Image: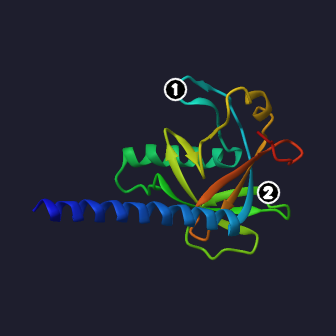
Amino acid sequence: MPEQSRWLAAAVIVLALIAVNVSIWQKEQLLKQGAVMILPLAPVDPRSLMQGDYMALNYALTRPLELTLYQQAEACGATLSAPCLPTSGTLIVDLDAQRHATQARFDQGEPLQPNQLRVKYHQHYGSLTVGTNAYFFQEGHGERFAQARFGAFRVGSDGTALLTDLLDEQGKVIQP
């Protein structure tokens, strides 16, 4: 029995390592091949003693959608027949020629136009998040990142958005 337990433990470890490496490979592929999307930010710069320096990220594009989710949640509480939007799903994001997001709406399953992306969202504590809601940086670099006005993302065909860079007002990458 102990021999069988060792083989089982080894198999579990190998499967875990395979899963982690597949996940890493998928994210690397997304960073290389994903569609570019640039979102305007509404950043705040809190400080966390446990986590180090980071910038909480809010997206100006999602604020009207947060209101819609809030209103629907109130309507759902009032009556069971009211339509409710899920706290996770996808958005249709319109992009201009420079890949800046100009408008977003909840995905109703319509086909995408050439200037659109389907992007996953998640509602967390009333805030609608695409990609990530925080950007961590090395302690002491907060002043540099306080200039961030845009977040550059790579978006996969499944709607997964990964933050690649923070950009200043001129659209230049802020270096750590």
Helix, strand or loop for disc 1: loop
Q: Which mark is residue 50?
A: 1
- Furthest residue in direction front, as rendered: 3
Q: Amino acid at mark 2?
A: His
Residue 107 appears in the rendering? no
Q: Which residue occupies 68% across, 33% down? A: 138
Give the answer, above or below, for where 20 lies relative to 110.
above
Q: Which mark is residue 21?
A: none
Question: Residue 37 appears at what percent x and percent y?
Answer: 73, 59
Give the answer, above or below, for where 172 lies relative to 108.
above
For marks 1 and 2 on the same chain, the one whose residue lies earlier in the sequence:
1
Helix, strand or loop for disc 2: loop
**119 or 61: nearer the eye?**
119
Q: Which residue occupies 23% across, 64% down? A: 8
Q: Which residue occupies 60% across, 52% down? A: 131
* Left-right relation of 167 to 75: right
Q: Quadrant of the C terminus?
A: top right
Give the answer, above or below, for where 85 lies relative to 47.
below
